[in-house]
Image: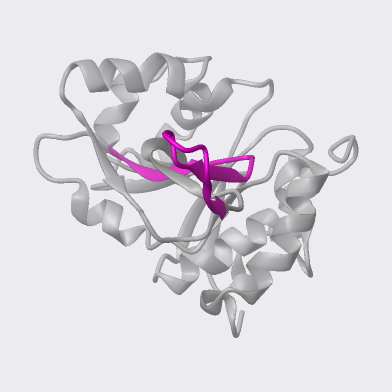
């Protein structure tokens, strides 16, 4: 597997690791302080990123001694985040050019968190046809299906989220449904943005063709 000796955030997309593209993206939007939740092969991550000075930002770390899941990993970083008015949370395997500051604006009073949503990316080409005559009308190559929206793995949150996080376990299964049930969770839909989740070698190849050419990364 690709991650046997390299932690996933350091897998190469062009001339940078995934997390380095994320740093460039966040820096583009004026974010200069980052907390990295690091577990598997964390020493490699620290060796590459250091204190962030080489990127013109400040990096602090919350280390996991064992896998804690997304919820536990965030809770483990509580001491570094609980005094902030709010913060952004970004999954370590997503690359995008969406504007995360829109999530900050969407986190209005009465809500604890906002989730970035994107239209469901179809893994297949779509064929449209006339249901009466069966005549083919249109082909669309792997379109986004706007009747359904998915979690983009990017959030704006208030520190009150820590009261709902498990010590171990996934936030998506444990915390977010509770917040939704209590009316504390909001969405912000991004209809037109580039978004990629890196889950396979094929995803790496696709990202290497797309990400370095996005306009927001010019000059980084």
Question: In this view, which residue lies farthest toward the left?
Answer: 109
State the quadrant of the N terminus. Answer: top right
Q: Is residue 116 magenta?
A: yes
The residue at the point 78 percent across, 43 percent down is 43
Name the residue nearer the viewer: 50 or 21.
21
x and y, in percent, of residue 4 in the image: 89, 35
The residue at the point 76 percent across, 52 percent down is 204
In the picture, measured across the screen, residue 183 lies left or right of residue 82, that is left
x and y, in percent, of residue 181 in the image: 21, 16
Name the residue nearer the viewer: 195 or 13.
195
The residue at the point 56 percent across, 68 percent down is 24
Q: Is residue 80 above or below residue 204?
A: above
Name the residue nearer the viewer: 213 or 155.
213
Name the residue nearer the viewer: 78 or 88.
88
Question: In this view, which residue lies farthest toward the bottom?
Answer: 219
* Residue range corresponding to the magenta coloring: 114-139
In the picture, measured across the screen, residue 79 lies left or right of residue 158, that is right
User: What main secondary structure does the magenta stretch of the protein show?
Assistant: strand
In the picture, measured across the screen, residue 135 lies left or right of residue 157, that is right
x and y, in percent, of residue 198 in the image: 68, 45
């Amino acid at each position: 597997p690709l991650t046997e000796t390299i932690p996933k955030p350091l897998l190469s997309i062009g001339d940078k690791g995934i997390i380095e593209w994320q740093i460039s993206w966040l820096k583009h939007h004026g974010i200069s302080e980052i907390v990295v939740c690091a577990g598997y092969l964390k020493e490699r991550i620290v060796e590459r990123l250091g204190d962030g000075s080489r990127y013109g930002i400040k990096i602090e770390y919350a280390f996991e001694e064992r896998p804690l899941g997304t919820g536990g990993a965030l809770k483990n970083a509580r001491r570094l985040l609980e005094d902030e008015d709010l913060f952004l949370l970004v999954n370590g395997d997503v690359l995008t050019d969406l504007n995360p500051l829109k999530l900050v604006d969407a986190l209005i009073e009465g809500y604890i968190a906002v989730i970035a949503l994107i239209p469901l990316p179809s893994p297949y080409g779509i064929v449209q046809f006339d249901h009466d005559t069966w005549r083919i009308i249109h082909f669309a190559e792997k379109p986004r299906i706007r009747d359904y929206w998915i979690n983009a793995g990017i959030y704006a949150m208030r520190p009150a989220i820590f009261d709902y996080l498990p010590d171990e376990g996934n936030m998506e299964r444990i915390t977010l449904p509770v917040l939704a049930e209590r009316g504390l969770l909001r969405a912000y839909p991004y209809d037109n943005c580039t978004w990629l989740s890196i889950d396979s070698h094929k995803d790496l190849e696709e990202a290497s063709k797309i990400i370095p050419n996005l306009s927001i990364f010019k000059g980084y």
